[in-house]
Image (cartoon, rainbow, N blue to C red):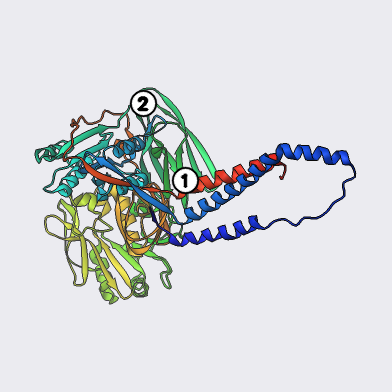
Amino acid sequence: MALDNITGLYALAAIVPFIIIYLIKPRHYEQEIPSLMFIMNQQSKSKATAFLKKWLKNLLFFIQLFAILGLALAAAEPWFTIPHTVLINNAVIVLDGSASMLTSHGSSTRFDQAVDEAKKHLGLKNTIIFATDIPLILVERGSRSEALEALRNAKAKASGTNIGDAIVLADDLIGNEKAVVTILSDFIATGGSDMLLAKQTLISKGNAVNIINIYEPANNIGIVGLEVDLKETIATIRSYQDKPVTTKLKVKHQTTTTEKIINLQPFATEKMIISTPVGTSTLTLDHNDDLAMDNEVYISTPTGGNLEVLLITSYPDQSKIKSALQARSDITVEVRQPPTINVHNLEKDVVIINDIDPDLFVPTDFRDMNSYVEKGGTLIITSQQELDIIKEMLDKQKVSALLPITLQEYKDAQTTVCVDLLGKIFNKDPFADEPCFSTISSYWKANFQNATITLASTKNDNTPMVVTSSLGGGNVIYYGIIDNKAGFYNDPFYPIFWNNLINTLLGTESIQEFNKKSGEVIAIGKQTVKTPTFITNADTLFLDEVGFYELNNKKIAVNLLNADESNVGREPIKIDGQVATTGTKATSSDRFDFALPLLTLALFLLILESVILKRRGDL
């Protein structure tokens, strides 16, 4: 037997005063008895009960003594190992930890059943691989006790299923040895390598593969899509049941809850549109099914103040940019028409010059705009057919840097506009695969100037279409697409482009940065993060829980939103295995902790003492 806390034995010193108290005899004193008959009766009763009283008195002594011993030994945290034999020498457990494993399975879940089965397949050396979007190693070549501890602490995650990559990882960890690989899953795979091929690779190297399918038929409806905008949110609800379902969608924001009735036909999908609340909120399906995780989603929006944009245009009713910006509830758009635009002492976040009549524009206003930019402002000049006249006006006012391109000629020719630089304005998805996003019929052929950055250009002659440059403490941007000469404004990406452009210029984050899908890995820099269940210090965050994460003085909402994981009732992938072992019988041992049994024994003895004292009349 060993002790984890040997200082706990100091508690045994309590036995010394305890025994001394019992050894101290009570002081005798005389008392007159008024009746001889009373004395005779008491003597007869004393003879009859003397033995019982003496026995009870000694029994209390031993009860109290053993209670003190139990508490003292429990404080020392004793333990010992129990030897036993195992048949498996090298065991590898691939445990599915995806969201679908949280599906109800009798009185527990599929994951609980898988853990119970995994405990039966441990060996002398144990490796446990947790199969989520990114396979994780819980234990590598650990003892049976270490493996049991890891299994007890394992929790299924808000993640997709990647059994294939987990099996490939198992193959790498096994190396040139032989092992028994036990795969426990519902085999509702949603990504990763081909698990059948990975399994065959293991077997071809002489390993035994046990397949334990935890799947049972299940019914579910869930929220599988969420499109969050500052103005409205679209939730996609899908039914995986073969009968009509009527349920409620509850929208909870702070102390207010609203409800909407949803009628779902068998295997149908419905979209619900709500106004996006400011701050944090939740959408909940009031429905009891076999998977609870996808019945609730979380929404987070920025809580900062509104952005102020000044739009200078001669034709406000025709401005496509105005419509795109007004789609955001946190942007206030003020429109001013030349010639009276009052641009001295501007305090706007962004100024946009879009489709102006040069004859009505006061040239000296450009000098005020130049001062505005140099003091830290942001100016966007959009292209138009009269851009050459505007360029001459800038040159005469000696503020030509407000237009970060050199004009050549106006061309009536059809071409496409393609992304040159991926980033926050033009995201990797989808522009990495298809960089061209708009077709235009007329444009100004131009060259970029030094110290500028071209984000997009024409495909045929590389004319810059979106150019940025710094000027003093601010920024100037040239937007070369003439909206009435192109169909870009009808593209769903048009308002997103302007949204991304404004956010990037002002250093603000888009609402997409506040709402993420589980399974993503984000770099956050070393900082303290509050996840939905614990607080940690990290520089990289794996979003494997649903709920709100608090970091960088903001709250990020993370949701499952995985239609395949929500489809918990579909037929699993067919994969066969074998029940076999490798190696010979070996001796292993498990640790057994005595602290809890000793505490339980002490508590029982104290309760027994109370019962005896009550029956004796001392309580």
Name of the residue lying farthest toward the left: 204
- Quarter of the image where one finds residue 178: top left
Classify 10 Å Cα crowding around label 2: few (below 14), some (14-19), many (20 and above).
some
Mark 2: secondary structure: loop
Work out whether residue 342 can be spotted. yes
- Residue 92 in the image: state x and y as whole percent: 22, 43
Above or below, 253 relative to 510: above
* Viewer-nearest residue: 360 or 324: 324
Mark 1: secondary structure: helix
Query: Alpha-carbon distance for marks 2 and 1?
Result: 48 Å
**Mark 2 or mark 1, which is nearer to you?**
1
Above or below, 97 relative to 338: above
Circle 2: residue type = Gln
Of labels 2 and 1, earlier in sequence is 2
- Quarter of the image where one finds residue 458: bottom left
Q: Are marks 2 and 1 in contact (CB under 8 Å)?
A: no
